[in-house]
Amino acid sequence: MNLAVKIGLLLVCGGWMCCSTGEASSKPNFIIFYVDDLGYGDLSTYGHPTSFTPNIQNMADNGLILTNFYSNSPVCSPSRSHDIM
């Protein structure tokens, strides 16, 4: 390729990358609860009859609940330390 074609491609690609739609992108918010000795069914979110957790229930109703978490270790320490870092 000659120099003029290279410069033309550079200007077209550079101009295309600088164009924006004018919309601001919003970043999602993540909240991870680390609770000691809390079972799956211990919250009202998962149907516990006597446990009343209105704020957690509100976040669950208006957000996303992820229920499948796995660890490659028999203890939870490596998973927790990975998420903290």
Image (tube, helix red, strand yellow):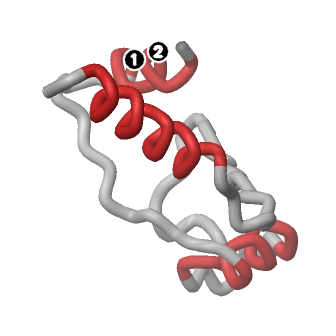
Q: Is residue 10 above or below residue 2?
A: below
Horizontal arrangement in the rendering, residue 66 relative to residue 20 (left or right): left
Mark 1 residue crowding within 10 angstroms, few (<14) / some (14–19) / many (20+): few
Q: Amino acid at mark 2?
A: Ser
Mark 1 vs mark 2: in front: 2
Tell me where residue 9 appears, x and y as whole percent. Answer: 36, 39
Q: Is residue 40 above or below residue 14?
A: below
Q: Is residue 7 above or below residue 77?
A: below
> Which image quadrant is residue 55 in?
bottom right
Tell me where residue 27 appears, x and y as whole percent. Answer: 70, 52
The C terminus lies in which quarter of the figure?
top right
Of 30 and 79, nearer the camera is 30
Tell me where residue 33 appears, x and y as whole percent. Answer: 64, 44
Determine the residue positioned at 79% across, 59% down.
24
Q: In this figure, which residue is indicated by the disc labeled 1?
A: 77
Determine the residue positioned at 60% across, 37% down.
34
Determine the residue positioned at 39% across, 64% down.
67
Marks 1 and 2 close (CB-CB < 8 Å): yes
Of 21 and 8, nearer the camera is 8
Alpha carbon separation for disc pair 1 and 2: 6 Å
Q: In this figure, which residue is indicated by the disc labeled 2?
A: 81
Q: Amino acid at mark 1?
A: Ser
